[in-house]
Amino acid sequence: MTKTYSIKKGQPLTQEQIREIDEAKKKPIVFDEDCEELSPAMMKAFKSAVVHRNRRKKLKKKYNSQC
């Protein structure tokens, strides 16, 4: 089951949210046919895409703040 919370930047987590996160850390990740485990090559490509996306977001934010 997935729970979604909307919190504002800097807002502290409640004790219940912290407890739920700690409990989730103890549970194993379960893969299935809809969400298969990534191969090492696919994981490397995914990480590279994330780094590239974050770099572009950072540059865009810097550029927008100068305008």
Image: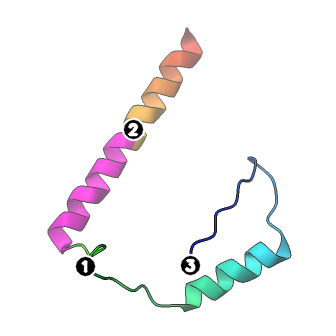
Q: Amino acid at mark 2?
A: Arg
Q: Is 56 in the magenta?
A: no
| C-alpha span from label 3 to label 1 | 17 Å
Give the x, y percent position of residue 34: 29, 73
Q: Earlier in the sequence, mark 3 or mark 1?
A: 3
**According to the image, label 2 marks what residue?**
55
Q: Amino acid at mark 1?
A: Glu
Looking at the picture, tell me which residue is in the foreground, 60 or 18: 18
| Image-based side of 63 in relation to 34, left or right | right
Q: Is 41 in the magenta?
A: yes
Q: Could you say which disc has been placed on residue 1 in the image?
A: 3
Q: Is residue 53 above or below residue 7?
A: above
Labels 2, 1: front one: 1
Looking at the picture, tell me which residue is in the foreground, 51 or 42: 42
Helix, strand or loop for disc 2: helix
**According to the image, label 1 marks what residue?**
33
Give the x, y percent position of residue 50: 35, 50
Labels 3, 2: front one: 3
Q: Could you say which disc has been placed on residue 56 in the image?
A: none
Circle 1: is it few (<14), some (14-19), or many (20+) Cα within 10 Å? few
From which residue to which does the magenta span run?
39-53
